[in-house]
Amino acid sequence: RLRKDGFTISSTTNCTTAFTDDVIAGLERVYALRTTYAIDSVNMSLGSGQYSNYCDTEQSTYKMTIDNLRSAGIATIIASGNDGFTTSISSPSCVSTSFSIGSTNDGEVFPIDFVSDFSNAALMLNLLAPGELIISAVPGGFYDNKQGTSMAAPMIAGAWAVMKQKYPTDTISQTYTRIKYSGVQVLDS
């Protein structure tokens, strides 16, 4: 593949990649459309790195863009990562004004409401949502069981939109509090 700046990238893994400037451009597009559409939350199912503290300085471009969305009443919901870290999460979920999301199982095979062993967690992790055995659309018009914090984050982004529909005057902090304390409490040992 050829990047915008002319550099060639290659990947030995079968995964989708994104450049930070492209992700930022997408977030800026959401901000630009805020008055055209009623946008309550943004889902970001991506990440890399390992951060045991907030990464606002290291990820200042993400921080500025996420803050801009937040000032417009749009919450940025981000998957925490799937490395099994127990004291750190990936970037950009480590930005202090985003909402980092970890994964729990859905109870179909394993006991319900346990943190997934692959889910990154840290003291700054905001919320957990089902991220194992999630029926997901796959290329070719089919469905398959998928797992990851990228399955959990859209659950929260969708719940966020439903909460905003029910409580349209709530601030981001109020919506977060409603979601955090109205859901099932999960102990992450």
Image (spheres, rainbow, N blue to C red):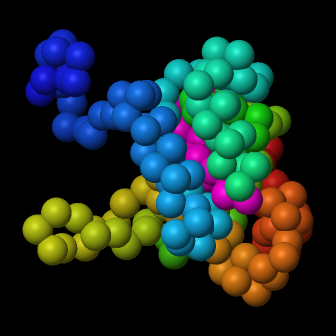
User: Is residue 6 something one can see in this rendering?
Assistant: yes
Q: Which quadrant of the view contains residue 4? A: top left
From the image, which quarter does the C terminus lie in? top right
- Which residue is painted at 18% across and 73% down in the image? 142
- Which residue is painted at 15% across and 74% down in the image? 141
Residue 121 vs residue 64, the one in the foreground? 64
Q: Is residue 142 left or right of residue 188?
A: left
Residue 32 in the image: state x and y as whole percent: 52, 53
Residue 102 in the image: state x and y as whole percent: 63, 49
**What segment is highlighted magenta in the picture?**
73-87
The number of numbered badges drawn on the structure is 0
State whether the magenta stretch is mostly helix, strand or loop: loop
In the displayed structure, 108 sits above or below 52; it is: below
In the displayed structure, 62 sits above or below 76; it is: above
User: Is residue 102 something one can see in this rendering?
Assistant: no
In the displayed structure, 6 sits above or below 150; it is: above
Residue lying furthest bottom in this view?
A: 166
Residue 39 in the image: state x and y as whole percent: 59, 67
82 inside magenta stretch: yes
4 inside magenta stretch: no
- Which residue is painted at 58% across and 47% down in the image? 78
From the image, which quarter does the N terminus lie in? top left
Residue 56 vs residue 36, the one in the foreground? 36
- Which residue is painted at 18% across and 13% down in the image? 7
